[in-house]
Amino acid sequence: MKKLITPLSISTLFFTNLAFADYRVEAKFYEENQLVSAPSLVVKPEVEALINLKDESTFSVVAKEVNSNIVHLNFNRQYKNQKMSLSTSVLLNKETTLNINGNTVSILISEVSS
């Protein structure tokens, strides 16, 4: 029985890691039609990624695969004492533009090849 468990465990771990690709999240934040920041980061599925940007803002994102074409995003951005939160589903490799509280956010998500 022990001989069966070890190969099964290794193959399960291998296929679990293959099933969830990392994602590149490219975001552009605009205020009054002016680009204020454009962070790009690679995130692991369902793991929060947090960065501090030069414009003194903080950007965090969590990506979760819905299916092979759609990723659900939760992200937060703190900028000039203003917090922007968003939870949405987006198509892979297709830029999505949203207007939140008068500010525009453009998001592009793609899978990262390993």
Image (cartoon, rainbow, N blue to C red):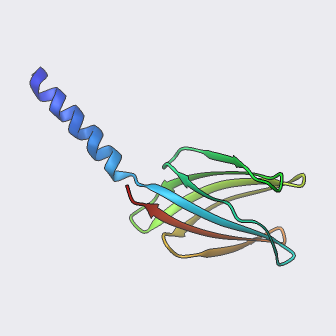
Q: Quadrant of residue 14?
A: top left
Query: Residue at image x 53%, y 51%?
Result: 43
x and y percent of residue 1 in the render?
9, 22
Q: Residue furthest bottom?
A: 33
Query: Image height check: is 45 above or below 28?
Result: above
Seen in the image, is 25 located left or right of residue 28? left
Seen in the image, is 85 located left or right of residue 7? right
Query: Residue at image x 58%, y 75%?
Result: 95
Query: Image height check: is 9 above or below 92?
Result: above
Query: Image height check: is 89 above or below 75?
Result: below
Q: Residue furthest front?
A: 54
Q: Residue furthest top?
A: 2
x and y percent of residue 108 in the render?
58, 69
Seen in the image, is 12 located left or right of residue 43? left
Q: Quadrant of the C terminus?
A: bottom left
Q: Quadrant of residue 100?
A: bottom right
